[in-house]
Amino acid sequence: MKKQFLVILLTLFTCSFMNAQVPFQSRPTAFTIGHKEFEISLFASSRYGFYKNTEVFSTVFLDWKLPNVGIKRLWWKKPAKSKQGFFKSRDIYFGTVHNLDYPNMFFKGVQNHKKDYISDTCVLPNVITMRNEARMTFFLKKKTSCDAPNFLFTLRAGVKNSFKLRKDYNMPPVKKTPLWYRETVVCLDTIVWFVGADLDFSLTGRLNMLADLDFYSVDWNVKDYSFESKISVYGYFGMNHNILLTAGVKLVCGTVYSDMKFSVLPMLDVAYLFKLKKKKREVGLFG
């Protein structure tokens, strides 16, 4: 009897240890941040759980000259209907992301400080860019009695276009590599469409790895394109595990206006999560 009890105790301990892993980021997925949770980020977008399954976000610090605002919504969940079959045996989540940018201030700053990028004789466009994206998320490895779910996979597709408020601009497309053509494309009468995939998985009990691959195209006829990939390692630290540290690299390869280029860019981010929900006050037996 004692041996059976020890075996059961050891099994429970092993399962609880194996299930302990770093929480997955909701940022690149169809999931949203929790209701009344606020995550402030140094380089990425800061987010707030405006409502259940709904968040609003904006990149505040890095792109302060590029006013932007967005909303993300998790619309529905398809529960697993069977134990067999790849998609039938998994919960599948679907969400959309929508955001607006006003890049005029950004281009004006470039024109003032980098005249070889944008000539001071150019009349800048006055536009609003809109990005719409759909995402589908599910776990490749399902949860078991002794294993936590792992390999969070997300597929996405979207389009970016612009609405020109000023028609008399004469600014040509900027061909400098530091100014990505996905932003300067607002000067053209065209769109940018993209497809991509993210894979997030647990490395250790303290760290996760996030890798993605994206394809961007200028115009439906693929006039110019770019393959982009980000590989990063992240973890949650601090007493309450609410400090998110991320480090990695971004790889870019494609034809930027008929010129093939390859770039490697470092990535680093620090984010802090605030939980604004008020804890229920503990009261005595008689309140």
Image (tube, grey):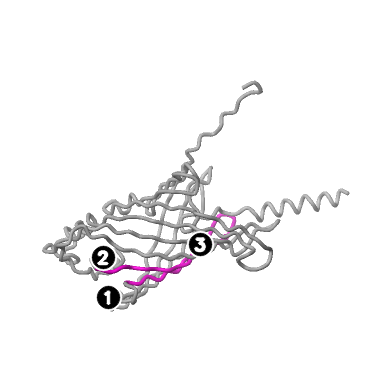
Task: Kindly give the residue lying farthest to the right in the view shown.
Answer: 1
Q: Secondary structure at mark 3?
A: strand
Q: What is the magenta range?
A: 189-218
Sequence-first disc among 3 and 1: 3
| Classed neighbour count for the residue bearing mark 1: other residues with Cα under 10 Å, few (<14), some (14–19), many (≥20) | some
Q: Amino acid at mark 1?
A: Tyr
In the image, is residue 202 part of the stretch drawn in magenta? yes
- Dot 2, crowdedness within 10 Å: few (<14), some or many (≥20)? some
Q: Quadrant of the C terminus?
A: top right
Q: How many residues crowd around disc 3 within 10 Å: few (fewer than 14), some, or many (20 or more)?
A: many
Q: Residue 136, which numbered label?
A: 3
> Where does the image place residue 265, in percent across and percent down from the top left?
37, 65
In-front residue for pair 168/121:
168
Secondary structure that dominates the magenta span? strand
**Contact check, label 2 and label 1, Cβ < 8 Å:** no
Calculate the distance from the C-alpha at mark 3 to the C-alpha at mark 1: 32 Å
Q: Nearer the viewer, mark 3 or mark 1?
A: 3
Q: Which residue is mark 1?
A: 257
| Element type where label 2 sits in the image | helix
Per the image, the residue denoted by label 2 is 184
**Front residue of 141 and 23:** 141
Identity of the amino acid at label 2?
Thr
Q: Do tag 3 and tag 1 residues touch (Cβ < 8 Å)?
A: no
Nearer the observer: mark 2 or 3; the answer is: 3
At numbered mark 1, what does the secondary structure look like: helix, strand or loop? Answer: loop
Q: Is residue 1 above or below residue 108?
A: above
Residue 48 spot, x, y in % from top left: 43, 46
Q: Position of residue 47 (x, y in %)?
A: 42, 48
Q: Residue 203 at what x, y percent from top left?
A: 57, 61
Furthest toward the top, the residue is 286
The answer for how far apart the CA atoms under marks 2 and 3 are is: 29 Å
Q: Is residue 254 above or below residue 167?
A: below
